[in-house]
Image: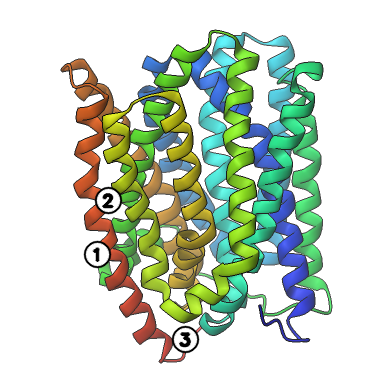
Amino acid sequence: MRVSAGERRAVAWSFAWFFCLLSSYYILRPVRDEMGVAGGVRNLPWLFAATFLVMLVAVPAFGALVARLSRRVFIPLVYHFFALNILAFWVALRYGEPALVARVFFVWISVFNLFAVSVFWSFMADVFSSAQGKRLFGLIAAGGSAGALLGPLVTVAIVGLVGPANMLVVAAVLLEAAVLCAQRLEFGEGKPGRDERVGGSWIAGLVMVLRSPYLAGIALWVFGLSIAGTFLYLQQAEIVSHASADPAVRTRIFATIDLTVGILTILVQFLATGRLIERHGVGRAAALLPLVFAVGFVVLAAWPVLAVVVTFQALQRTANFAMSNPALQLLYTVLPREEKYKAKNAIDLLVFRGSDALSASMFSGLRSLGLDAMGTSLLVVPVAIACLFLSLALGRGQERRAETPVNHS
């Protein structure tokens, strides 16, 4: 993987930032998944709907923040806010009503994950060009994969000793370390870009998505694959809940999935992501995830058992993190700055979580009508195939835009 001398410091701090960020999240994620199961699988669609409602409030607030503050101010501010939230949940889990805290925590972490990661990739798309991103985004994403590997390792090793609640303190410390990395990238010698206020209105991101066929295509791609991911997540929750009644065992199952994904993803990112995207293009890289979904749901329809759902989840998340997500982030490098922060966050947050809420309700409704695992799995296959062709179209659009200089103002 080719990294020039002038890029090394910026890439190193970007790697470290994503490493700390996803280490924090992947310590929290198994706790979230166990709380979702403990709170009742039937309640998950309501939790997804609640998450979307929170997003409806959070996205305009974030848009207003971005419009008024420079990124060197609003990025640390966002992460400090979430770190304080984590510590508040640590206190609540120790002394509050467990069922209520579990549901609020499930919604909160779904918001936290999307905001924290979306802000990171908005910054990456802002400071690296499309050509740089093709070479470097795989390596930078590998920092997140290394963090996603550390988080489950730590959880598997000590959750039985300290309990799920105390894992939150470790996660908060790692999130603060991510802030330090972001500040070093912004202020250090390797600072790769300018820092200016984005400006505009709080609702500008939604307007941009509605007006631009390119952004609307990205939104549709995210929407379709979110449906597939939610259906898989809910089927996973059902199968795991039937596999064991022990919360520690279920938490360990979720952490084991995360650990497997981390190992596979980091190997692909270090060895192949950059080369494959440069050789085959953004569209084909993005198409890998819908291809895995299409094949995986056919297999899950035939064998809806724990081994299959664990393998499917591991493969689709590896395809996402190793190839399709870096390709998705490259789609934004050819956009003006305001679209990188506002339109991107509108897609990452509102479109993604809106799809979650809708697909969770669809899943619950289909189950209430008596549709079994085979039926719900097969319904997703056409959606995945449509996203596959959309990936190729977006890749062609990205290449055309990359030939025209981007106005960053």
Under mark 2, the amino acid is: Ala
* Contact, mark 2 vs mark 1 (Cβ under 8 Å): no
Estimate the x, y position of residue 279 in percent, counting from the top left: 47, 80
Q: CA distance from mark 3 to mark 1?
A: 26 Å
> Does the image show residue 11?
yes
Find the residue positioned furthest to the bottom. 404
Tell me the residue that label 1 is attached to. 389
Query: First in sequence: mark 2 or mark 1?
Result: 2
Look at mark 3 in the image and give the residue it sits on.
406
In the rendered structure, the answer to whether residue 137 lies left or right of residue 40 reads: right
* Dot 3 alpha-carbon crowd within 10 angstroms: few under 14, some 14 to 19, many 20 or more: some
Element on which disc 1 rests: helix
Relative vertical location of residue 45 with respect to residue 265 in this rendering, above or below: above
Residue type indicated by callout 1: Phe
Q: x, y (%) of residue 10? A: 74, 74
Q: Front-most of 21 and 383?
A: 383
Q: Position of residue 17 (x, y in %)?
A: 73, 58
Q: Residues within 10 Å of mark 1 (few under 14, many from 20)?
A: some
Q: Quadrant of residue 156?
A: top right
Residue 303 sits in quarter? top left
Rendered residue at 36%/71% (across/down):
283
Give the quarter of the figure containing the N terminus.
bottom right
Instruction: Please rate how many residues cluster around mark 2, counting C-alpha atoms within 10 Å: few if below 14, some from 14 to 19, many from 20.
Output: many
